Image (cartoon, coloured by chain):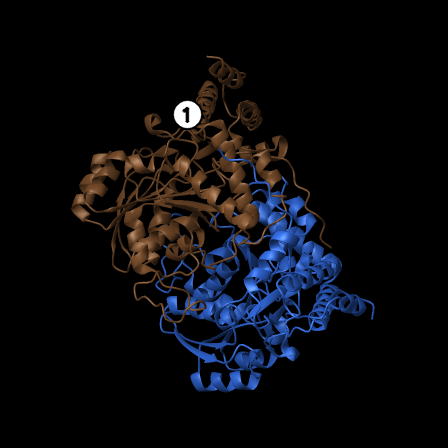
Chain colours: A blue, B brown
Amino acid sequence: MFNEINTPIRTIMTPGPVEAHPNVLRVMSTPILGQFDPAFLAIMDEVKEMIKIPFGTKNEQAFAIDGTSRSGLEAALIGLIEPGDKVLIPAYGRFAYLLGEICERAKAQVTYLEKAWDSVFEQDAIIAEIKRVNPKIVALVHGETANGQMQPLEKIGKFCQANDVFFVVDTVATYGGAPVKVDEWGIDIAIAGTQKCVSVPSGLSLITYNERVEKVLTARYQKELGLSKDFRNERHISSNYLDLSQLQRYWNKERINHHTESTSMIYALHEGLRMMIQEGIENGYERHSQNDRAIQAGIEAMGLFIFGDRTTKMPTVTPILIPEGVDGDAVRNTLLHDFGVEIASSFGPLQGKVWRIGNMGFSSRKENVLHVLAAFEAALLFHGAAIHRGEAVLAALNEYNK
Amino acid sequence: MFNEINTPIRTIMTPGPVEAHPNVLRVMSTPILGQFDPAFLAIMDEVKEMIKIPFGTKNEQAFAIDGTSRSGLEAALIGLIEPGDKVLIPAYGRFAYLLGEICERAKAQVTYLEKAWDSVFEQDAIIAEIKRVNPKIVALVHGETANGQMQPLEKIGKFCQANDVFFVVDTVATYGGAPVKVDEWGIDIAIAGTQKCVSVPSGLSLITYNERVEKVLTARYQKELGLSKDFRNERHISSNYLDLSQLQRYWNKERINHHTESTSMIYALHEGLRMMIQEGIENGYERHSQNDRAIQAGIEAMGLFIFGDRTTKMPTVTPILIPEGVDGDAVRNTLLHDFGVEIASSFGPLQGKVWRIGNMGFSSRKENVLHVLAAFEAALLFHGAAIHRGEAVLAALNEYNK
């Protein structure tokens, strides 16, 4: 027979999912409301407004999609792409290729601008490639969790806006942990998730887009056959579930019956965003930065090396080179099974080469940082790594007391 | 500023979402685990096995998709459909047209077999149409919540299996509330949701499929570009997010990193299914039937009429004709705002013509039925309906004491 779940407690210092805020966990126990109950619609309306704050936007459209982060990426891209459209994807890490995968499946003509994963692009290099390729859409990742790099965006966005190119940005790994300025940077669609710096379990994607995008969606809107047999549109979006033109009409006044909103996850999102706003978005960035500095100080005090360009490092991920002769997975297993601490491996060319310590949302706390450094040092020593003993935690503590 | 949510308590007697089981609400407060934490993978494995039980299947493949019910419908259909494929959709209610919408967007050639919404098809009529159209896929809805009708399936399924036609069935509104027998009835893919008879909040879709479908998915599998640049497939599925060939490899041994599983919703699903299994699936059907009989007895005792063919009525929905001269929405508003009771209106040709009382999952309880009937009688009288007074609740109580 099946018993009730009985889970171990973990210190989750991966680049997502991270520990949910206790208030978020609590609010999910609230009895549910019907999807069109006025009391629920009021909660949805507040969520829309709160989503905008960490996006740095005054866009009319901002809402949640009932799927994990990549459902929002797909909704954004297929909302804009029609077969044959040109998309430029500057790639400096794994998730650029997820954007590419989605675009290729939408029958876009995709051009990749590629580089090694250890740093970001000069913005001018991307702008030069936009001029050469002349795409309808530029899609890129703000913060690449695979390698911990964060791409500056403001010049690219301004160029796109001036040249009628759509600028789609994946902010899943930065939203709430590092500044994202959708309006100031000229981003047309930005996408985030709940399972990282929002401190909400995975399961929703957050999206905002401006009037340029709304115009495209309006031109492509097709009413669902079950609601009207007459409102057909040849340019309709390829998916029904991820059709932004319908989702928008579900989250706004029209309230079309598109799907049954994920009530408890919306409660969770409401509380997660509220906690972020209550802390102060800027204070949240400072907390992430401070914990990031402490992690880096601790790692370097052990004599380990941090991967990639430090001037463009994300505050929310620290990739650490696995020393020669150390079994990276064995260290992670000791951390998980003996200390209850989870850190991550990586993908593609970095698989087996770096560990990644995440620093996101509710997991980004001083005691977590200190605990992880102490556990990491012990696990490394246990597996025979030649590191400096007794330095890491002290270095972090000193960083906090500067 | 934004305050914490403060929701009213509702008696939810709609055809979904319904009241979540209290144990389900509670388990969602469990701290989360990482998506590849062995402790979480063990929970996923149990969920796979439990999903199969109300589906009545020994299929190897059964898992959850991180989206509401219609995400599963879309995943099922786009997993099978390639452009130009013929799909036959017998339509006796609204949700058949949702299947059609999804198939049309997938560029299938769709034939509808249509009828009035007051009854289901003779199975032989559908079989005759399959012979005429010769489709690759027959897709239909087991229980149509819009009109409360439930289509017998076993002859259709057997014919499809014998003739190499794929049989895709939407069991969203019946799974757990009425018998669903995937293996016995010859269903190739069945799809359900969480927000109805599973007593879990909306946000996950449940799916099972057999080896015939697995073969198609294997032939269409394409590895994600972010994980491998070499594994391309011209026949790949149109969506990345709803790609069953990838999802299957996330839920099985391969454990590809497709998305970040919705931890808390999986906890909820585990508990919801566990409660169903603990009650006994057959006992659950009997509970739904008994409460359905009580609702019908109460409604008829008031002198109201139940819409549609009673011999094929779903036990989980009762559509009630709105009497001449009564404002259906006004009655529903009184129920919601004065009694905290939610019942539903309907769609399409039935909009404004019927109310629908749902009877699903944890909402399907004797005290809910009695409370709703009492409230409904009072609300009808308050709005001037000419009904028999003081009969409804007694008729239901007598039904329970037969």
In percent of width and height, residue B338 lies at 63, 32
Quadrant of the rendering where the N terminus of chain B is positioned: bottom right
Residue at coordinates 59% horizontally, 35% vertically from top-left?
A: B23
Residue B224: image quadrant is: bottom left
Query: Which residue occupies the extreme right position in the image?
Result: A401
Q: Is residue A17 left or right of residue B160?
A: right
Identify whether B185 is placed above or below B389.
below
Q: Which residue is mark 1?
A: B305
Query: Which residue occupies the extreme left position in the image?
Result: B132
Can residue B283 be seen in the rendering of this structure?
A: yes
Q: Is residue B112 left or right of residue B97?
A: left
For numbered disc 1, what is the local secondary structure? loop
Q: Is residue B104 left or right of residue B389?
A: left
Identify whether B379 is placed above or below A108.
above
Which chain hosts label 1?
B
In percent of width and height, residue B116 lies at 30, 37
Residue A199: image quadrant is: bottom right
Residue at coordinates 31% horizontally, 33% vertically from top-left?
A: B119
Identify whether A68 is placed above or below A120.
above
Q: Is residue A103 left or right of residue A208?
A: left
Is B240 or A53 nearer to us in this picture? B240
In percent of width and height, residue A304 lies at 66, 73
Is A386 or A110 nearer to us in this picture? A386
Query: Which amino acid, mark 1?
Result: Phe
Residue at coordinates 44% horizontally, 51% vertically from top-left?
A: B251
Query: Which residue occupies the extreme front position in the image?
Result: A384
Can residue B203 be seen in the rendering of this structure?
A: no
